[in-house]
Image: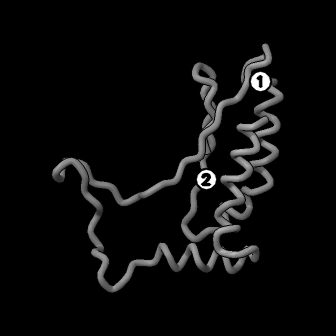
Amino acid sequence: MLLLSSLSHALSHADARHGHHPRAARRAREAACRPSARSSPMMAEMANGKMEFDNVAREWRCKWQDDGGGKASSATLVAIADVVDEFLPQLKALDGAVVNRAVCGGGLDFKL
């Protein structure tokens, strides 16, 4: 359950950083993402210009436990889903936010 606690903490940490009020936190995050007068409208570059991107993402990961039933019935995944569902409306309310979930059965990874 330590991993579940860590995921919950990570998801709630964004609001806690900017105060406890969700609107104030959202305004602070949106202001931080707005381009400044000095920022360039060009895509960011990496690898000496061989890679360009216009999307920067945050990913939270944790491990889940296979209790014998795999992804279909894992109690750990159910608990993770409950935590994610609690914070999903706040995450989706962020301007331009896209939220994806990924579950890896081989590595027992959950990614948000």
Q: Earlier in the sequence, mark 2 or mark 1?
A: 1
Quadrant housing residue 67: top right
What distance separates the C-alpha of mark 2 from that of mark 1?
A: 21 Å
Q: Secondary structure at mark 2?
A: loop
Where's residue 81, x and y in %? 77, 42
Outermost residue on the top side: it is 68
**Type of amino acid under label 1:** Ala
| Residue 32 sits above or below residue 68 on the image | below
Give the camera-side residue of 8 and 33.
Answer: 8
Whether the residues at callouts 2 and 1 have beta carbons within 8 Å, the answer is: no
| Above or below for 109 versus 95 | above
Q: On the rendered structure, is 66 left or right of 53?
A: right
Q: Amino acid at mark 2?
A: Val
Residue lying at 70% horizontally and 29% vertically, measured from the top left: 64
The residue located at (21%, 47%) in the rendering is: 47
As drawn, 106 above or below 58: above
Relative horizontal placement of residue 83, taking residue 33 as reference (left or right): right
Q: Is residue 85 above or below residue 97?
A: above
Residue under the image location 60 percent in, 27 percent down: 104
**Quick check: 55 left or right of 82?**
left
Of all residues, the one furthest to the bottom in this rendering is 37
Q: Position of residue 83 (x, y in %)?
A: 78, 48
Q: Position of residue 12 (x, y in %)?
A: 71, 59
| Figure disc tally | 2
Q: Which residue occupies the extreme left position in the image?
A: 48
For the N terminus, the image quarter is: top right
Q: Quadrant of residue 11?
A: bottom right
Q: Can you tell which mark lies on residue 72?
A: 1
- Report helix, strand or loop for mark 1: helix
Q: Quadrant of the C terminus?
A: top right
The residue under label 2 is 99
